[in-house]
Amino acid sequence: MHKDNIDTAMLAEAGAWRSRDLAVLWHPCTQMAEHPDTLPLIPIRRGRGVWLEGVDGRQYLDAVSSWWTNLFGHGEPRIAAAIARQANELEHVIFAGFSHEPALQLAEKLLALAPPGLARVFYADNGSAAVEVALKMSFHSFLNRGDARRKKFVALSNGYHGETLGALSMADIPLYRRVYAPLLLEPLFAPSPDAYESEAGESAEACALRRADQLAAIFAQHDGEICALILEPLVQCAGGMRMHHPAYLRRAREICNAHGAHLIADEIAVGFGRTGTMFACEQAAVTPDFLCLSKGLTGGFLPMSAVLTTAAVYEAFLDESRDRAFLHSHSYTGNPLGCAAALASLAIFESEPVLERNRSTALRMAALATPLREHPHVAEVRQTGMILAIELVADKRSRSAYPAGERRGLRAYRRALEDGVVLRPLGDILYWMPPYCIDEGALQHLARATLAAVQEATG
């Protein structure tokens, strides 16, 4: 068959697929009225490495790791094989009163890798569920110890922790929170240590410490009432990839200790090497009371999450009374297939110098982003490990934003798709968070397409 005929047939197939999709599906984080015109819907047939192949035959570089989940590339054969092997042995079993080898091995490995002092692993289904678990465990553990005054949580402005009601309660992004506000808990919001908001001449570290002082004041005002502080270590991802100095984490740990409160580290997006270390908390040399993990946990293959906590929290629930037990469950808790995928992902970290390679890749990302730093409509190019963000603004000097209705980020997204790059924006903030296997050629393609997308969006 002639190439033109093949392309025509593929385009027709893609068009038919879109029609079928829009007749029955409801996509997440999407205004469906924008399909198919304003927001292009792209049917994907398969993925290999950093590339996605559309039904129409086009290739797309997955610069956002499919919502920050994929670590080692699409179709990674070692993870796929591990899932297949496990599926032939045990696909699932109730995890209440039963156990299995993959769940046990995974818990042992996670605790060995995590910051010292974490002693127990509770499995859940996704990142939001992990946050729910941590919030409930924190409150319930105090209650079990006879401390009924602690009913409050502290969260950071501009933070995001998921879409279930408890997790959403801890968020401070109006786009997600506003509609559901009447249904939500009301945490105490502390100012974000976001270095982008630093004062003139103030370093990122000084900004972090100033914000930590404000956090301390909140704890002092509500002494004995706070269960926990929840935060995203180093990078507030959904809030625009806003980044802060590790000094804030150190002070936050000290403040929680001083007031007998827990520290919940939401590393759902930043864990497993994204920030340059296995876990972001390592860069501040702190151990949280709860470490929430998901997304990259299974290498991007299957939905799963884990909450790591301390022996002290666990022991608060040990009693003959069932009321004091943690009666929180998910049907697929400890799913063997998810555990097998996670074990295969961790095995790659063990057998290859993943973190060292990531640091080299991060340096190349920084170098390739240099032209963007000089662009008259880019306020900042910021980076933590393999997360790089580009902040588009109307005026570089004043950092004044574009009117939201102009949707400059969407313009950039559409242009990048034309160049075969998935560059899904956060408002007017573009970012790179590619799978770790991205090579030099793909990085250069990403840089070229991003510059073209910025020019298109700001022209």
Image (cartoon, helix red, strand yellow):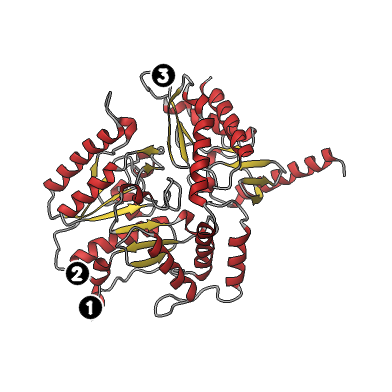
Q: Quick one: label 1 or label 3, which is nearer the N terminus?
A: 1
Q: Which residue is mark 2?
A: 144
Label 1 to label 3: alpha-carbon separation: 61 Å
Label 1 to label 2: alpha-carbon separation: 9 Å
Figure quadrant of residue 134 = bottom left
Q: Measured from the top left, where is residue 447 in percent x and y?
A: 57, 32
Q: Which residue is mark 3?
A: 395
Label 2 to label 3: alpha-carbon separation: 54 Å
Q: Which residue is mark 1?
A: 319
Q: Measured from the top left, where is residue 14 in percent x and y?
A: 70, 45
Residue at horizontal 40 percent and vertical 57 percent from the top? 293
Tell whether 459 sits left or right of 56: left
Residue at horizontal 40 percent and vertical 60 percent from the top? 113
Q: Measured from the top left, where is residue 353 in percent x and y?
A: 52, 52
Residue 58 in view of the camera: yes
The quadrant the N terminus occupies is top right
Residue type at mark 1? Asp
Under circle 3, the secondary element is loop
Asked if marks 1 and 2 touch (Cβ < 8 Å), the reply is: yes
Under circle 2, the secondary element is helix
